[in-house]
Image (cartoon, rainbow, N blue to C red):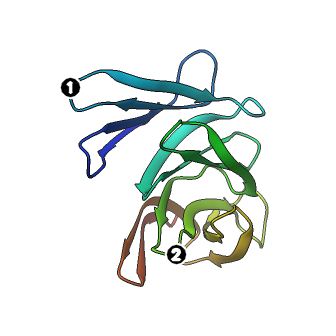
Amino acid sequence: GSLRATTDASGNLYIGARPTVPTGMTLHKISPNGTTIYSNTYNGDNDGNFSSMKIKGNTAIMVGGRAVNQTVVVARDLTTGDVAWTANIPGFVGVDVEIDDAGNSYVLSATYQDTTLFTGSNLLLYKLSPTGSQLWVQNFNFAPTENPSRLKLAGNRLTAISWFANNS
């Protein structure tokens, strides 16, 4: 499974991971002196396959998914580690996430091509409000199969990194 770690301005360490049992998304908060402040697992509807997380302000946005073409997004309160909201949106698995200054989340995922099922995948980019409501989705089809890898927000510009295969 995936593992991501980052720190806040106070030096606390946040580790996002997929536990082995149960499946889900775990958020660990560790103080600068090494004391575990909390270790909370979200296991909504047997959600697994943790992929990525970002923190901004007092919020952590975690993404992952299930094998049923469902991307799972979980917002956590960094003070307590409790779940603030969840969203289930179409897409294989949430690959990466970014948060803008207004608290909106951008989620990178993929889905089956619109033209013929099981012939490849398209890149999906979602924008969610600070409460988890979908604001928009963009579907990109550059090649027979897009494989999203990373998402980066710099200022007001989003960059999605993807590799693609053309079946050759």
User: Which corner quadrant of the image does residue 45 belong to?
Assistant: top right
Q: Which mark is residue 81?
A: none
Q: Could you say where residue 43 lies in the image, as x and y percent from the top left?
A: 69, 29
Q: Name the residue under label 1.
A: 33
* Marks 2 and 1 in Cβ contact (< 8 Å): no
Comparing 17 with 39, the one in front is 39
Outermost residue to the left: 33
Residue 109 in view in this figure? yes
Name the image quarter holding residue 13: top left
Q: Residue furthest bottom?
A: 156
**Quick check: 17 above or below 10?**
above
Tell me if 3 is positioned left or right of 96 in this view.
left
Q: Which of marks 2 and 1 is nearer the N terminus?
A: 1
Query: Neighbour class for label 2 at 10 Å: few (<14), some, many (≥20)?
Result: few
Secondary structure under the numbered disc 2 in the rendered image: loop
| Position of residue 154 measured from the top left corner of the image (x, y, whole percent) | 34, 77
Q: Where is residue 27 in the image (x, y as percent from the top left)?
A: 48, 33
- Residue 135 lies, with reference to residue 9, above or below; the image says below
- Residue furthest to the top in view is 21
- State the image coordinates of residue 30 (x, y, percent, origin top left): 33, 29
Provide the residue designation for mark 2.
Answer: 102
User: In this figure, what is the number of numbered marks?
Assistant: 2
Cα distance between the residues tagged 2 and 1: 32 Å
